[in-house]
Amino acid sequence: MVTPLNLHLNYLPLELDCCSFLQEKMELWDKNMKTTEVVFEAVLPVLKLLSMALIGLLLSHPKIQMIPKPTLRLLSKLVFFLFWPCLIFTHLGPVISVKKFIQWWFVPINVVISTAVGSVLGFFVALICRPPPEFFRLTVIMTAFGNTGNIPLAVVSSVCHNEDNPFGGTCYDGIAYAGFSQWVSVVLVYTLIYHMMEPPLEYYEVIEEGTEIEELTDLPTRNENDLSTPLLIEAEWTGIEDQRTEHCQTPLVATIFNSISDVSQSNIPDIESIREEMPSSPRSYGCLAEPKVVRKIRIVVERTPINQILQPPLIATVLAIVIGIIPQIKATVFGSDAPLDFITDSLAMISDGMVPAVMLVLGGMLWEGPNESKLGLRTTIGIVVARLLILPLAGIGIIYLADKWNCLIADDSMYRFVLLMQYATPSAILLGAIASLRGYAVGEASALLFWQHVFGLVSISVYIFIYFKLLVNLF
């Protein structure tokens, strides 16, 4: 006899299967929704930046000319001398302290590591793609040195502008982390990169053969109304043409350290004439005469533009650190009860214009298009792939190992995000300025910067999504 109880027991397994099936579907739905939210959160910051860049591109169109090139130059100067320093000062100063200064030690180290790994990748790109010999060093440099300045700051600001960002209330600490790394990047550019970007000795001789050296030293003075210099060159170093000297476009290091007997020295500066221009040192006389190697190194150091290191963003970084680590001064400058809070608040209001101004200038810069390049399509693709696709993958492994070795601040996702972003950005725009200053591969550097920033819009979006997923599941 079939009773209601027996009938219910017969259908019980079927009901349990339906419940488990529905539960699995709901979990899958929740997982898909979370993935969609992560994708949206990753793409939204870049879409904001892209929208501002498109506005700059449209307004700088020759048929519209609402933002002509001279205006973009002035806007670029405002970013460099005002907006950028204010952003670093107002976000780094309130957060920094002696304890955090010590805790953040891996931020500048990470810049050096990313540059070293990028140099290795660039070396392999140069070996595989075989660029023209005079551009071998350029291939290594453009792969190695990334933008650790305005692009990470713009991305972090855009991410934190969204109230639903995954970093919560500590999101804006990312601007402090990015600003803290400025001094390392600047020192690397004006020392190592400056000398690596000098014209190759053989290339210099071929170009100048049959000409007088005075043709190189009689550099033209820059006219303020001259619009021939691309925006890519002046985007991070305005007035670059005014910083040229008669020796900045000569192969100084190669001239001093290479003793090549079969190379004609008629068209390159003489080491003796260079040394005569230097102030005499008492170590050069008598029994205390300098060794030749030491004297050569001293000449190179004296020809390094150390005075250019103190740029406004770096000055703002140093001031923020000095004021932030001294509690008595910090209490008078930062904080709602600080006597000078009205000044800091004013600087914070000014700094809000940094991201829109940077993206408007970037849009106008992209409208100019790439310069003519002799680097070759294969090498250009190799540099873009290595810089934007391979190096970020290496960065994930490096940051993962650093986290496992307890080199990073515990439970700080934004700290890790900024470290990862240092591997994902295009090459530093400042490299174009150094190329112009040294007179070496100006068109090639400008073209590489153009294509990297175009494809970087896509690659940064992809890697922000990857970073968000990793920060949730792995770190």
Image (tube, helix red, strand yellow):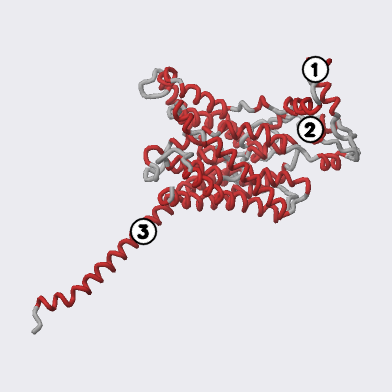
Q: Which residue is mark 3?
A: 31
CA–CA distance between discs 3 and 2?
A: 60 Å
Quadrant housing residue 300: top right
CA–CA distance between discs 1 and 3?
A: 75 Å
Looking at numbered disc 3 in the image, what kind of residue is underneath it? Answer: Lys
Q: In the image, is 255 to the left or to the right of 422? A: right
Near-viewer residue (179 or 161): 179
CA–CA distance between discs 2 and 1?
A: 26 Å
The picture places residue 252, in percent across and down from the top left corner, at: 79, 32
For residue 255, above or below residue 18: above
Looking at numbered disc 1 in the image, what kind of residue is underneath it? Answer: Leu
Q: In the image, is 179 to the left or to the right of 200? A: left
- Mark 3 or mark 2: which comes first in sequence? 3
For residue 461, above or below residue 9: above
* Residue 44 seen: yes
- Mark 1 or mark 3: which comes first in sequence? 3
Q: Nearer the viewer, mark 2 or mark 1?
A: 1
Q: Which residue is mark 2?
A: 252
Q: In the image, is 21 to the left or to the right of 299? A: left
Mark 2 closeness class: few <14, some 14–19, many ≥20 residues within 10 Å: many
Callouts 2 and 1 close, C-beta under 8 Å = no
Please tell me whether mark 1 sits on a helix, a strand or a loop.
helix
Near-viewer residue (75 or 215): 215
The picture places residue 157, in percent across and down from the top left corner, at: 46, 39
At 62% from the left edge and 51% from the top edge, which residue is drawn? 386
Q: Which residue is mark 1?
A: 288
For residue 320, above or below residue 114: above
